[in-house]
Image (cartoon, rainbow, N blue to C red):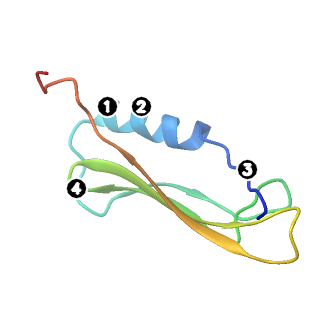
Amino acid sequence: MGDAVFNIDPFLEAIEIQNKLGGLPDGTVIMKIQANRQNCLSEESKIVCHKGKIVQNMFLRLQNVECGEVELQLEWIDVSGISP
């Protein structure tokens, strides 16, 4: 089935940047992560502000398998203002 590893630190840094700067315009690219030999990215990944949320789309190359990729989207949802 394969596996892939990615670093969540840039995503967490982007959340901190968004919190410091406040409401960023929709579509603002906060950070770009280049595909390289140290990560499983098969192409550049952008962390953007989308409808008030921080979103990162990734295409990850699978390891320990003949071939394959998986598409993944991380989305930060701020639930601090939502009551249970």
At numbered mark 1, what does the secondary structure look like: helix, strand or loop? helix
Instruction: Determine which residue is flagged by label 3.
Output: 5
Residue 12 x, y percent position in the rendering? 50, 35
Residue 46 x, y percent position in the rendering? 50, 61
Residue 43 seen from this side: no
Residue lying furthest left: 83
Residue 47 x, y percent position in the rendering? 46, 55
Gap in Å between the C-alphas at discs 1 and 4?
13 Å
At numbered mark 2, what does the secondary structure look like: helix, strand or loop? helix
Amino acid type of the residue that numbered disc 1 sits on in the rendered structure? Asn
Between 80 and 31, the one lying in front of the other is: 80
Gap in Å between the C-alphas at discs 3 and 4?
30 Å
Instruction: Determine which residue is flagged by label 1.
Output: 19
The quarter of the rendered structure image containing the N terminus is: bottom right
- The tag earlier along the polypeptide, 3 or 4, is 3
The label on residue 66 is: none
At numbered mark 3, what does the secondary structure look like: helix, strand or loop? loop
- The tag earlier along the polypeptide, 3 or 1, is 3
Q: Give the residue displayed 33% in from the left and 59% down from the top.
A: 28
The label on residue 16 is: 2
At numbered mark 4, what does the secondary structure look like: helix, strand or loop? loop
Question: Cβ–Cβ below 8 Å for labels 3 and 4?
Answer: no
Gap in Å between the C-alphas at discs 3 and 1?
26 Å
Gap in Å between the C-alphas at discs 1 and 2?
5 Å
Question: Cβ–Cβ below 8 Å for labels 1 and 2?
Answer: yes
Gap in Å between the C-alphas at discs 4 and 2?
16 Å
Between 38 and 6, the one lying in front of the other is: 6
Residue 29 seen from this side: yes
Question: Cβ–Cβ below 8 Å for labels 3 and 2?
Answer: no
Amino acid type of the residue that numbered disc 4 sits on in the rendered structure? Pro
Amino acid type of the residue that numbered disc 2 sits on in the rendered structure? Glu
Q: Give the residue displayed 29% in from the left and 40% down from the top.
A: 77
